[in-house]
Each structure stands twice: as C-alpha cells, then as structure tokens.
C-alpha cells in the first residue's frame, strides 16, 4: 500500500512539473513575440529595448509566470529592418524535484518582427 501511494505521488509530481515547463515555455514564447512587436514599433533602438523589456515583464506577470531573478531580455535591431527579442526565464521546480526534476530549468524563446518603417525608423 505504501509503495503504491509513493508511486502515485511521484507520477503526480512528474505531471505537475512537465505541465509547468510546457506552460512556461508557451508563456515565454508569447512574451517574446509581444516584446518583438513592441521593439519593432519603437522609433529608436533604445526606445525599442525599453519597450520590449517592459512588455515582456508585463506579459509574464499577467500570465503568472515567476522567473527566478526576473526574466532576462536581449533586444537587437538589425540594419536589415528586424527587431529580435530573446527571453530567458528560469522556472523554479524545487517543489516537484522528487519526480526527478532539477530545482530550476531555463526556458528560452526568440521572436523577430519587421521594423515598421513609418513608426520604427530604419533600424
């Protein structure tokens, strides 16, 4: 009896951990896309970086994603007219570590958008 309860708990922890990683990955993807859109519509690269960081933080907070140490956001605008945002979020999994997960796992996503030539300038 004790073995079956322990096995059931480990399976439950595994499912919760796997869902947390999957959902966090989807949320980081959405935040990166939103950040890239914000960077692409800004008038300057500096404004784009600020806008992307703000939008990414807000998007993750709205979705309830808690990144250990906050999200890491890298923003670049190329001379070819692309704004690219890379978001890395370290997801805490310490509560489901009995199922074999590490205490934290980084989730990364990159998204690009064309810079709007009317609103976002030339790069």
Image: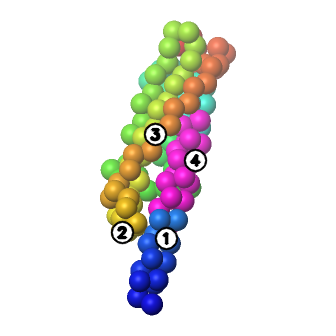
Q: Is residue 116 left or right of residue 88?
A: right
| Label 4: few (<14), some (14–19) or many (≥20) C-alpha neighbours in 10 Å | some
Q: Is residue 90 left or right of residue 29?
A: left
As measured in the structure, the alpha-carbon distance from the residue carrying label 2 to the one carrying label 1 is 10 Å
**Helix, strand or loop for the magenta stretch, by majority:** helix
Disc number placed over residue 98 in the picture, else none = 2
Quarter assignment of residue 75 = top left
Q: Residue at x 34, y 56 (%)?
A: 102
Q: Nearer the viewer, mark 1 or mark 4?
A: 1
Asked if 8 appears above or below 58 in the picture, the reply is below
Q: Is residue 28 magenta?
A: yes
Which residue lies most toward the bottom here?
Answer: 1
| Label 1: few (<14), some (14–19) or many (≥20) C-alpha neighbours in 10 Å | some
Disc number placed over residue 26 in the picture, else none = 4
**Tag 4 secondary structure:** helix
Which of the marked residues, 4 or 2, is nearer the chain's N terminus? 4
Residue closer to the observer: 69 or 51: 69
**Tag 2 secondary structure:** helix
Q: x, y (%) of residue 115?
A: 60, 19
**Tag 1 secondary structure:** helix
Residue closer to the observer: 70 or 14: 14
As measured in the structure, the alpha-carbon distance from the residue carrying label 3 to the one carrying label 1 is 26 Å
Residue closer to the observer: 93 or 9: 9
Q: Nearer the viewer, mark 2 or mark 3?
A: 2
**Tag 3 secondary structure:** strand
As measured in the structure, the alpha-carbon distance from the residue carrying label 4 to the one carrying label 2 is 24 Å
Q: Nearer the viewer, mark 4 or mark 2?
A: 2
Residue range in magenta is: 16-33
Determine which residue is flagged by label 3: 108
Determine which residue is flagged by label 1: 11
Check whether the beta carbons of the residues at disc 2 and disc 1 lie within 8 A of each other: no
């Amino acid at each position: 009896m004790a073995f079956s309860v322990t096995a059931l708990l480990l399976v439950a922890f595994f499912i919760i951990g796997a869902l947390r990683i999957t959902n966090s990955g989807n949320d980081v993807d959405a935040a990166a896309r939103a950040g890239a859109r914000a960077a692409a519509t800004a008038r300057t690269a500096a404004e784009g970086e600020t806008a992307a960081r703000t939008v990414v933080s807000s998007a993750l907070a709205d979705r309830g994603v808690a990144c250990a140490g906050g999200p890491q956001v890298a923003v670049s605008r190329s001379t070819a007219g692309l704004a690219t945002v890379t978001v890395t979020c370290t997801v805490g999994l310490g509560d489901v570590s009995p199922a074999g997960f590490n205490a934290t796992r980084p989730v990364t996503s990159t998204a690009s958008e064309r810079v709007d030539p009317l609103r976002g300038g030339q790069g």
